[in-house]
């Protein structure tokens, strides 16, 4: 929310303490985003298009531990089953 710009190669990573079905919305978000729901095993379980300023709930429909938001143009080709590498250096 309140993020007017998300540069190419950048994203917002949400890390949850457990794995569960997750829901996000785009209220007060002015740019289209790809919302990538990622499971405990770091496999993409769902990809949803977040429309600017929408209050529609975007559900992972399957359990997710992580959620990554990136620009829609960068994330629209990512499909469920894709593997994600996370590094916390």
Image: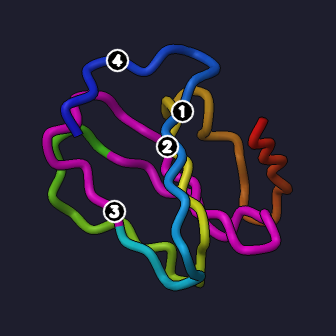
Q: Which residue is mark 2?
A: 69
Q: Are marks 3 and 1 in contact (CB under 8 Å)?
A: no
Task: Specify few, some or many for label 2: CA neighbours under 10 Å numbering under 14, 14-19, or 20 or more.
Answer: many
- Residue shown at the point (43%, 49%) measured from the top left: 49
Q: Rounded to the nearest whole Å, what is the CA distance between mark 1 and mark 2? A: 5 Å
The secondary structure type at the circle numbered 1 is loop
Q: Rounded to the nearest whole Å, what is the CA distance between mark 1 and mark 4? A: 10 Å
In the rendered image, residue 53, in percent from the top left (x then y), is placed at 16, 42
Q: Which residues are magenta?
A: 24-50
Q: Rounded to the nearest whole Å, what is the CA distance between mark 2 and mark 4? A: 12 Å
Q: Which callout, 1 or 4, points at the residue further toward the start of the chain? A: 4
The secondary structure type at the circle numbered 3 is strand
In the rendered image, residue 31, in percent from the top left (x then y), is placed at 30, 28
- Mark number, residue 11: 1
Question: Horizontal placement of 72 versus 76: left or right?
Answer: left
- Mark number, residue 47: none
Quadrant in the picture for residue 64: bottom right
Q: Could you tell me which quadrant the N terminus lies in? A: top left
The secondary structure type at the circle numbered 2 is strand
Q: Which residue is mark 4?
A: 5
- Residue shown at the point (49%, 43%) measured from the top left: 69
- Residue shown at the point (37%, 71%) measured from the top left: 23
Q: Is residue 89 magenta?
A: no
Q: Could you tell me which quadrant the C terminus lies in? A: top right
């Amino acid at each position: 929310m309140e993020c007017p710009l998300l540069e190419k190669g950048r994203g917002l990573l949400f890390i949850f303490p457990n794995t569960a079905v997750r829901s996000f919305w785009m209220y007060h978000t002015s740019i289209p985003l790809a919302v990538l729901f990622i499971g405990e095993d770091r496999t993409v379980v769902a990809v949803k298009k977040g429309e600017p300023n929408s209050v529609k709930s975007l559900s992972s429909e399957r359990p997710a531990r992580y959620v990554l938001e990136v620009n829609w143009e960068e994330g629209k080709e990512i499909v469920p089953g894709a593997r994600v590498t996370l590094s916390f250096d």
